[in-house]
Amino acid sequence: MAGALRPEDRPISPHLSVWRWHVTMATSILHRLSGIALYGAAILLALWLIAAAAGPETFAQVAPHFTTWYGQVLLYLVVAALAYHLANGIRHLVFDTGLGLTPTDADTSAWFTILFAIAAPIGLWALLSFGG
Amino acid sequence: MRSALGRVRHHGASGEGTGHFIAQRVTSVALALLAPWFAVSAALSIRDGGYLATIDYLSDPVNAVGVILLVAVSLYHMSIGMQEIILDYIHRPFTKITLLLLNAFVPLALGVGAVFAVLSLNFGV
């Protein structure tokens, strides 16, 4: 047969189109997505530090964006991604010890992770606005 | 049971990867401490996002050391994580190798730059 498919072009079995969604599946993919988001955030952190060391003029090109509405939204999302990835990361470390692996326990801890990821950035925002 | 062709093409288990597994767990524990510390302390100290507040924050030796550790450990952790993602989804050889090289070099370059920046702020290079 001429022109056989390369391995990377062959069809694969369906996944997202056929599996019923459940919370542990969601937390797993969210862990990866939040990790990717934090990859970008870490790059921004490094650039922010480099800009600060480069002097006030360079910093002035970077810093004002953080006090705009979109900058605040971005920071909020970064904190949410961090909170999620942190909570789910701890959940995975607990799994590594062998605890909490039953479906019931895994579902419960999954919901707590999601709850933490919603509550933590709100908590930090409240701390900044009303505390300190 | 392995065919001769499979052996030549390096099919089957790689026999390595435990090192990365352990490194991810160890860096996770470190980041579980460093990241929340930085998020809260930097947010509280640099509220206006201004230049002076930022320099003041980074001139404190505790903050400087913490930030250097955070940057180094984060970039290592994220590079390992991203390598797994690339290997999961990208199979075309040219794209895969390009992305793996970028994932190896960009975090390293930014990490060295950021550490240099924090040091130069404190020691006036």
Image (cartoon, coloured by chain):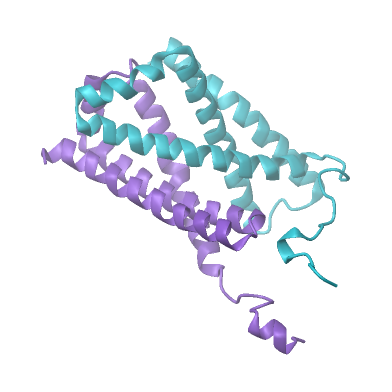
From where the camera sits, is residue B9 visible? Answer: yes
Q: Nearer the viewer, residue B121 or B107?
A: B107
Splitting the image into 4 quarters, where does residue A81 fall? Answer: top right
The quadrant the C terminus of chain B occupies is top left
The quadrant the N terminus of chain B occupies is bottom right
Q: Nearer the viewer, residue A54 or B34?
A: A54
* Count of number-bearing discs: 0
Residue A44, above or below A5? above
Q: Is residue A89 left or right of residue B12?
A: left
Q: Position of residue A50 (x, y in %)?
A: 28, 36
- In this view, which residue lies farthest toward the bottom? B4
Chain drawn in purple: B
Q: Residue at x 69, y 45 (%)?
A: A28
Q: Residue at x 67, y 32 (%)?
A: A114
- In this view, which residue lies farthest toward the front? A2
Q: Is residue A90 left or right of residue A110?
A: left
Q: Position of residue B62 (x, y in %)?
A: 25, 38
Chain drawn in cyan: A
Splitting the image into 4 quarters, where does residue B90 fall? Answer: bottom right
Q: Position of residue B82 (x, y in %)?
A: 54, 51
Q: Is residue B100 left or right of residue A10?
A: left
Q: Residue at x 19, y 42 (%)?
A: B119
Residue B2, above or below A1? below
Q: Is residue A115 left or right of residue A68?
A: right
Q: Residue at x 54, y 56 (%)?
A: B83
Q: Nearer the viewer, residue B21 or B125?
A: B125
From where the camera sits, is residue A131 visible? Answer: no
Q: Position of residue A15 (x, y in %)?
A: 82, 49
Residue B17, above or below A16? below
